[in-house]
Structure formats: structure tokens, C-alpha cells
């Protein structure tokens, strides 16, 4: 029983490490310098108008380029998800528990990929021209 | 050890079937991006509460909780129906006739991943409402 739990813990820690570093890597590969301020402050501040205000947004990226970049970013995310799962299943899994690793990876990716978040918000701003 | 060998073979396998699988996941992820982007903006607009320092005290807990629940409901319904709509579109790039589309739920993987990423990124007001709710309930200021 204890062995099963240790195995599960190893499984979860491996997923965490792999998704954390691959998430950072993907975010850096498709990085676009959008905001002058720190991205995390979007989550942490109640008032984020200053972050998305025009003064703080770089506008030299074309919308087409932005959409293309986001699509490539998504493609790399889904492919890495697929392969992380394959790598994780290399670990011993005698008890054959069914953990939804996708949820864990998604949570880590959302937290780590701050530039992806910024790009989506910039696209929304470009299309609808609002500062919500 | 046998299991490891089998799984490592699966990991490094790269043939037309594997390539078709990745293409299928990618196709559905891109389609989901389009649907989730616009529906996410719409849902965030429907349940919008303006949270500024001036009106923060005017927002009642009832309004905050009810709009948060409404937004969750719309997110769940949105993701359910978007999946149903997207699955109507067939996989357009099967590279070999041996490939059976969505045999191992490839379409669902692409859809759910892209949906989670886009919905969480686009619904900024939802995140702000959750943060305000947390602040109200536990008196924790998130700075």
C-alpha cells in the first residue's frame, strides 16, 4: 500500500517537473515582448487597467503575426502534452492508478505560460479594441 | 521492465499513424482556439462586474457570488457544446488509410487542452472576481 502511494507521488512529482520546465521552454520559444510591466501583476492586482493601457502595450507586432504566433504556441503545447504523458508512463505503474495528468499539466502550464496569457489578451484588445 | 520497454517503444515510435494523431490533436486544438476565444470573451462580458477602487465597496457579496456561479455555469455549458460542435468537423489530414480518427480520443485531448488554456487566459474578469471573493471571505489581499 505504502509502495503504491510512493509510486503515485513519484508520478505526480515527475509530471510537475516535466510540465514546469517544458511550459517555461515553450513560453520562451514563442516569447513576444508585449508588456512593460510584470505579467503576474495581472493576476495579483485588482486594478489592471494600467497594465493593459495603451502606454504599456507594445504595438509593433502585427495582428496576423500575433495570431500565427498563438497558433504555433498552441500546437507546441498540445504536442508537449501528448509526449509528457508518454514520458510519464515510462515510470513504473504497477498499481495502474488512473490519475488525470492532463489536469495537473494544464494547471502548471496556465501558471507558467504568462506570455501566452498576455498574447491572448493583446489579441482580444486588437480585435475588440477594449481595455476591459 | 517489460512495461518500460513497451512504453519506450511507444514514446519513440514515429510513423504515419503517429504523425496523423499529432495532426488530429493540432487540428482540433486550433478549431477550439477560434471557438473558445470568442465564446470566452462573450461569457466574460455577460458576467462582467467592474472592479475598480471606486466601486469595490458597492459590489455586494450576492452579486459577486451569483455572477461567479453564472460564469462557471456558462463555462461548463460552453465547453460542453463547443466540443459537440467541433466534433462535427471531420479530421481532414489522415495521412494513411490505416489511421482511424479519434480512436484514442485524440480529438477530445486537443479540444480540452486548448479550451482550458484559452478560457483561463481570456476570462480576466472571472479571475478578478475569484480574487475579490477570496479577499472578502478570508480577508487576504492579493498583491
Image: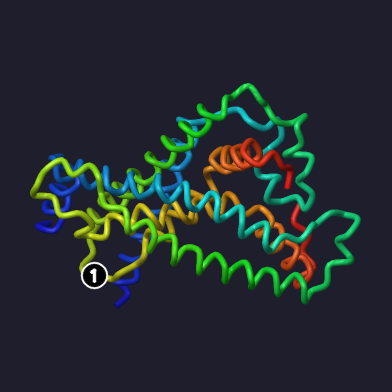
B79 left or right of B91? right
**x and y, in percent, of residue B87 in the image:** 33, 58
Residue name at image x 79 percent, y 74 percent: B61
Classify residue A40 by image quadrant: top right
Q: Is residue B114 above or below residue A131?
A: below
Asked which quadrant contains residue B142, the reply is bottom right
Q: Position of residue B39 (x, y in %)?
A: 55, 55
Figure quadrant of residue A89: bottom left
- Would residue A130 appear left or right of B85 to someone viewing this image? right
Q: Residue furthest top?
A: A60
Tell me, what colour scheme is on the image?
rainbow
Q: Which residue is mark 1?
A: A96
Q: Could you tell me which chain the residue with mark 1 belongs to? A: A
Closest to the observer, B57 or B13: B57
Q: Residue at x 44, y 67 (%)?
A: B80
Question: Which quarter shows the N terminus of chain A?
Answer: bottom left
Q: Position of residue B78 (x, y in %)?
A: 50, 64
Residue A52, relative to residue A17: is it above or below? above
Amino acid at each position: 500500500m505504502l509502495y503504491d502511494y510512493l509510486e503515485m507521488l513519484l508520478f505526480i512529482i515527475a509530471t510537475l517537473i516535466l510540465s514546469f520546465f517544458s511550459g517555461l521552454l515553450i513560453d520562451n520559444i514563442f516569447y513576444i515582448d508585449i508588456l512593460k510591466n510584470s505579467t503576474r501583476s495581472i493576476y495579483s492586482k485588482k486594478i489592471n487597467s494600467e497594465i493593459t493601457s495603451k502606454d504599456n502595450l507594445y504595438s509593433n507586432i502585427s495582428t496576423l503575426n500575433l495570431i500565427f504566433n498563438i497558433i504555433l504556441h498552441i500546437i507546441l503545447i498540445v504536442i508537449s502534452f501528448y509526449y509528457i504523458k508518454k514520458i510519464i508512463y515510462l515510470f513504473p505503474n504497477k498499481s495502474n492508478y488512473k490519475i488525470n495528468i492532463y489536469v495537473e499539466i494544464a494547471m502548471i502550464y496556465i501558471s507558467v505560460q504568462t506570455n501566452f496569457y498576455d498574447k491572448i489578451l493583446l489579441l482580444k484588445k486588437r480585435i475588440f479594441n477594449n481595455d476591459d | 521492465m517489460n512495461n518500460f520497454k513497451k512504453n519506450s517503444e511507444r514514446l519513440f515510435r514515429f510513423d504515419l499513424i503517429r504523425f496523423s494523431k499529432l495532426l488530429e490533436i493540432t487540428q482540433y486544438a486550433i478549431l477550439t482556439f477560434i471557438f473558445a476565444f470568442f465564446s470566452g470573451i462573450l461569457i466574460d462580458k455577460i458576467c462582467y462586474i467592474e472592479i475598480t477602487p471606486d466601486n469595490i465597496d458597492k459590489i455586494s457579496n450576492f452579486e459577486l457570488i451569483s455572477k461567479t456561479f453564472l460564469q462557471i455555469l456558462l463555462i461548463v455549458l460552453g465547453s460542453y457544446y463547443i466540443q459537440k460542435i467541433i466534433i462535427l468537423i471531420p479530421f481532414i489530414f489522415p495521412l494513411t488509410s490505416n489511421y482511424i480518427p479519434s480512436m484514442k480520443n485524440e480529438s477530445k485531448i486537443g479540444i480540452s487542452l486548448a479550451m482550458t488554456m484559452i478560457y483561463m487566459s481570456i476570462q480576466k474578469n472571472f479571475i478578478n472576481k475569484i480574487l475579490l471573493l477570496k479577499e472578502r471571505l478570508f480577508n487576504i489581499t492579493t498583491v
